Image: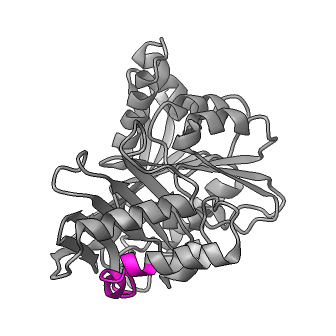
Amino acid sequence: MFAQAILVAGVSIPVMNNDMNAHLTVMLQDAFSRLMPLLDDPAIREVMVNGKDDVWIERNGGLEKTACRFSSNDARNAIRILGTMTDREVGMRAGEALFDAAFSSMRISAVLSPIAIRGHALCIRKLAGVTKSLSDYLPESAAAYQVPAPEAKDWAQDFRIPQRVHERLLQWVRARMNILVSGGTSTGKTTFLNALIRVMPATDRLVTIEDTQELIVDLPNHVSFEANASLAVTVRDLVRQTLRFRPDRIVVGEVRGGEAFDLIQAMNTGHDGCLGTLHANSAFDALGRLEQMVMQCGVDWPAEAIARQIGSCIDGVIHLSRMDGVRQIENMIQVEGYRDGAYQTQTLLQRA
């Protein structure tokens, strides 16, 4: 599994002869040999190396310490080989002690010692590689959710949405509404974003922008951009560039910085049907987080002016959460503007 992932890397691989590529792959497999049982276990989502012989995993939503022995030499060799295969410098010079790469089935982040005080650190997240449709989120029974009165409380169990909300989401996407998917780490934001993308009309031209490639898009007219720290190309740079690519829709895999300002500007100047994810504690909190990102990028606007811009361009927010290892759709709001110092919203979904 791992060798195949390397050979079809989602980042650029340096041009090299087949013998060299095969040689590096063998070396990488050898460096990762102690982690291979963990990487090949389908129940394990993430493998975390905190330092020498300190390996943790996420299995079925919970964290566990393993008995796996993984030396500093193993970690250093693996990181350097990955750097060679992805044409990136890895070392102790400025900008070379941190390493991130995305492959077809996993995302790898590394920090070298002495920046990582307890030894070279690695975090390997296995990407689901699964695209769900919105219909996959429809309920099979009614138990876990409630809706404000007087609506019927016909809700679903874990990670499901009611038929009424399913229809509303279809309406939002087809009507080119601007939608945010919020939540914490590993709550299923990207998978849900993929589900929304799948109901976009095939006639639309879509541009996706990601810090690390994870979106799975099968629309025929699709351009995909990925930020690259080694080339000093940021997500914000790509949002700006995207406006010159005649997009019908723009999707930002994760909004986390100054690109928030450029994205809401695009939404407010005729680019409808945009989607994006961000980290937040609730659907309503996502609007405040977006405000903070805009303010932090140096825009000299009053906070209320920023809020008005957000209230006029964001149409809805879906918030995902995870509790005791179980992912769930916690709440969903429709945004109806910003008036009298507050966002005007309608709650469409609220977990009990």
**Which quadrant is the C terminus positioned in?**
bottom left
**Residue 114 located left or right of residue 265:** left
**Residue 70 located left or right of residue 312:** left
In percent of width and height, residue 85 lies at: 56, 64
- Which one is nearer the viewer's eye here, 323 or 39? 39
- Which one is nearer the viewer's eye here, 4 or 97? 97
| Name of the residue lying farthest toward the right | 203
Query: What residue is shown at x 36% (from left), y 84% (from top)?
Result: 36
- Is 31 included in the stretch rendered in magenta? yes
The image shows residue 25, relative to residue 14, as above or below, that is below
- Which one is nearer the viewer's eye here, 223 or 142? 223
In percent of width and height, residue 108 lies at: 42, 63
In percent of width and height, residue 284 lies at: 36, 43
Query: What residue is shown at x 25% (from left), y 45% (from top)?
Result: 115
Q: How many marks?
A: 0
Dividing the picture into quarters, in which one does residue 45 lie? Answer: bottom left
Color scheme of the displayed model = one colour
- Which one is nearer the viewer's eye here, 328 or 119? 119
The image shows residue 254, relative to residue 3, as above or below, that is above
| Residue 303 seen in render | yes
**Magenta residues, start to end:** 29-43
| Residue 187 seen in render | no
Dividing the picture into quarters, in which one does residue 220 lie? Answer: bottom right
Query: What residue is shown at x 56% (from left), y 35% (from top)?
Result: 232
Query: What residue is shown at x 34% (from left), y 46% (from top)?
Result: 280
**Residue 233 located left or right of residue 145:** right
**Residue 330 located left or right of residue 134:** left
The image shows residue 183, relative to residue 344, as above or below, that is below
- Is 28 included in the stretch rendered in magenta? no
In percent of width and height, residue 205 lies at: 80, 53
